[in-house]
Image: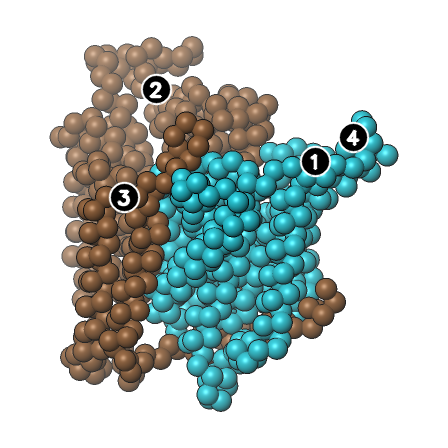
Amino acid sequence: MEDILYFLQQVINGLTIGSTYALIAIGYTMVYGIIGMINFAHGEIYMIGTYVTFIVIAALGMLGIANPFFLMAAALLVAVLVSCAYGFAVERVAYRPVRGSKRLIALISAIGMSIFLQNYMRLAQGSRDMAISSLIPGGWEFGLESFAVNLSYMQVIIFSVTLVCMLLLSSFISRSRLGRACRACSQDAGMARLLGINTDMIISMTFVIGAALAAVAGLLLGMYYGVVNPYIGFLAGLKAFTAAVLGGIGSIPGAMLGGLLLGVAEALTGGYLSTEYKDVVAFGLLILILLFRPSGILGKPEVEKI
Amino acid sequence: MPKLAKQTLNTAGTSPAETIPPQPSYRRPWWSALAAAVLTLVLGGSVLGVQLESTGITTTVRLMGMDTWGWLLAAALAVFLHQLVRPQIEEWRARTRKPSRFSVPDVMSGQKRQLWIMLAIGALLIFPFLSNRSAVDLATLTLIYIMLGLGLNVVVGLAGLLDLGYVGFYAVGAYTYALLNSYLGFSFWEALPIAGLMTALFGYLLGFPVLRLRGDYLAIVTLGFGEIIRILLNNWTELTGGPNGIARIPKPTLFNLEFSRRADEGNIAFHEFFGIDYDPALKVIYLYLLALILVLITLFVIYRLLRMPIGRAWEALREDDIACRSLGMNPTGIKLSAFTIGASFAGFAGAFFAARQGFISPESFTFIESAIILAIVVLGGMGSQLGVILAAIAMTLLPELAREFNEYRMLLFGLMMVLMMVWRPQGLVPLKRPQMELDRG
């Protein structure tokens, strides 16, 4: 019985982390779906979102505001706005000018942007860990006396916010005019432009949406862990990318599924094998997927046309 | 969420970016300039204008002083003005651009070229005897980076495969020598070829599954590989010593003559053999000369490879994958050869690095190292050997010349990669071939 509860606890923890991976992964997958490139700087946007969250919470805390839900809402608003600005600017500066050139060039530009943002943040905010105390402590416990499964309020908030974001995004993509334009661009950008869709605007919008979701993930994970430093974006970005590939890059539901699966896989490794090798699992998994099913779980195989 | 399963941002049929070149539109320069200025303020103000501070157990926010905000305002103003005049600048540049040109680069005649190369090698050979010890040491470090740059250049510049985990191979080479030495007592010269083979094997095993896929995946998988290697080295404490690393790695010998004050058992020290006084500088000079020889061999091998069918195939594949396949070439095999050969150079460099340092730990093999090597290749001009050499020299000398530069080094490297790709993707010293260029549009 205890074994089952222990397993359950790992799954809960895994789903918590996994749902934030899914939020970040959507940014990768949408950008890849439209312009076919990996936005390496996406993890850094998530990191910036976390920093802004911390700044807002600390600043409001200094003003004496203590209502956790107001703090969270304010942080969410500012973090999303700033991250969107960064997402937009990154696309303008680093990606748009190289859009017409070869893949390798766009990739190097993206990796350069990622290194730049990470070090920019390090110089601006220092490389030390910054911590905030938990805004919403506590949770539910259930199970046996010898081992109780812990489900914290924060975890519930992470699940529900993620779910709301996913629902909003999917209804935006499937119902709205802009969402339709977005899907049109991902199917055939040249044709979409001929039909009067402003593809540049749609591409910008994709980056902005991705950045907004990354900021939400940054807020949630920042409040969950309570720690931030300029280097968190690198690993989070890599894992979210793994999640996107796992689910099938280019597919939004795939990114969600991939994120959850990766989170659970990681938590189980951490719970049963060793925490040190948690990160190795993500990369090992990535290599295995690419080996056996490069199109991911929900993706379609790519057809190259000349 | 069954509903979600329907929509897929489908990539099938979307050929890459080429189909959508960005279109400039300057309908309302005032508005776009104002928007850009506000954006600059938001970007800068949110991060640079306020700073998190931890005081005791609480975290507070400090509003930066007038000077920081002054700079931010100045930056916003500069962006505003630049955006206002940008249409004019671009129009002017479009007008002054030369329509089309035929260029034959001045390829030096064989004899003259050989003379120059001989002179350069001669100067490099004499250099350590005329210079002081720290300069020679720095030069050795530069030579290691040149070797790494040349190796990565085969993968990135020639074959067009973005390898972000190159430092992983470097680590494999270094640890191969260190482990062989500390467990089995191998000497540097015995371990060097094994280190090369070992990294080649790693390159092969990693490249084999991944190279069949599109280039983007390779970048991220190699990035993951570099991290895996580092995590493994850090955590496999029984074998690698974990974060403490491996110490007391012996320096290379010259035909079993050691360059230390007192030789180990069974060996003879260099100065005793020749009956001269012990001079610690000799060791540094020997390491320098060794690095120089390794670099020259690397240069020669790559130079020859480039003129062999396999080298031509690398470049052809980089230029057009589909055309190559339709000519009956095997892209996976060709890419794999570039990847493996590039990796083995990192292995040699790694073994030499371990021997020179005498101590290695996973700290030396972080992603930053990969980024620096990539920056060397990008700055030098992808595919160009001379460019890579010059870039490696610049990259290692600059931090030494300006200490305060070190703080901003990675920031500038990142910025440089972006700007180079935007403005001059072929690098500062691009690979020159007789060619005809026709400017379209």
Give the farthest residue toward the left. B130
Q: Which residue is mark 1?
A: A271
Query: What is the number of the mark on residue B257?
Result: 2
Q: Which residue is mark 4?
A: A147
Measure the C-alpha gap from mark 1 to mark 3. Answer: 43 Å
Placement of A134 over or under A19, stated as above or below: above
Q: Residue B406 placed where, x, y %?
A: 26, 39
Amino acid type shown at disc 4: Phe
Badge 1 marks a residue whose secondary structure is helix
Amino acid type shown at disc 3: Met
Amino acid type shown at disc 2: Leu
Q: Which chain is brown?
A: B
Give the farthest residue toward the bottom. A195
Placement of B69 over or under A140, stated as above or below: below
What color does chain A have in the rendering?
cyan
Q: Residue at x 62, y 72 (%)?
A: A171
Q: Nearer the viewer, mark 1 or mark 4?
A: 4
